[in-house]
Amino acid sequence: MEADPGSAHDERGALGLQEAAARHGAYRWVERRLFELTGSWAAAPGLPDEARLLLFEASAAHAWHAELWEARLPVLAGVDHEELTRPLGRAAEPLLRSLEPGAFGGDDETAGRRFLVGLARVVLPLLLVSYRRLGQRLVPVADGPAIRALTLVVRDAEEELRAAETLVDGLLAGPEAVQQAAEWTRALGDPGCRGGEGDDLFPWSEADQA
């Protein structure tokens, strides 16, 4: 059975062309960044083989997701797809930059684990919130291709999240490691550390979040 990308359709109406272009471009942007990040961290020191395999597989999936969103970008006069491929709001870019290799300093063998914690407990949950809100705004009669792409992307993101959560739980041996992971999560996930934005990787208008 296909994954449901959202709940019942939102009665505020379908997305306009410009709003859909901005959304799909933002999702292409984040999937490309996750392709790069997961691929880079797959070679990090201190990670078990199952973590490396997860990250290699996730990297390939994110590359494919970026292609799916690129295919949904409209053709607009004077605007190419690279111009549309950018984040929405102030939070996403610094959040993902803070998870780049080297952002944690030195060759610390805990760095790969910190990335997995950030991926499982902050980035993927925020992204899934945004995808589900998008699903509430899509109209089957007009947005069939976008709904199909969203269904596939959400299915993969949910599977990646489950696998990453399982790995993180296995890597956090002892109360000290659990406490440290909680501190990493708070630092990344606190809206105050992400420009004041809430539980969505990309902001919607206040009316859209109501």
Image (cartoon, rainbow, N blue to C red):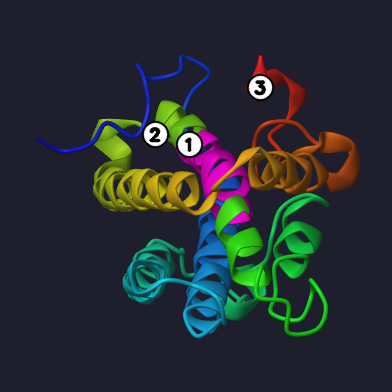
Q: Which residues are magenta?
A: 118-131
| Residue drawn at point x = 34 percent, y = 31 percent | 139
- Inter-mark Cα distance, 2 to 1: 7 Å
- For marks 3 and 1, the one nearer the N-term is 1
- Mark in the foreground, 3 or 2: 3
Residue visible at 35% across and 74% down? Answer: 49
Residue type of the residue flagged with mark 1: Leu
Q: Amino acid at mark 3?
A: Gln
Q: CA distance from mark 3 to mark 2?
A: 15 Å
The disc at residue 138 is 2
Q: Is residue 189 left or right of residue 151?
A: right
Asked if residue 17 can be seen in this view, the reply is: no
Is the C-beta separation of discs 2 and 1 under 8 Å? yes
Outermost residue toward the front in this view: 174
The residue located at (75%, 57%) in the rendering is 95
Amino acid type of disc 2? Leu
Specify the principal SS of the magenta part. Answer: helix
Residue 75 versus residue 146: which sits nearer the camera? Answer: 146
Is 26 magenta? The answer is no
| Secondary element at tag 3 | helix
The percent position of residue 14, horizontal first and vertical second, equals 46, 31
Q: Quadrant of the N terminus?
A: top left
Quadrant assignment for the C terminus: top right
Counting from the top left corner in percent of width and height, residue 74 is at 46, 63
Q: Nearer the viewer, mark 2 or mark 1?
A: 1
Per the image, the residue denoted by label 1 is: 134
Label ID, residue 209: 3
Residue farthest left in this picture: 1
Q: Is residue 124 magenta?
A: yes
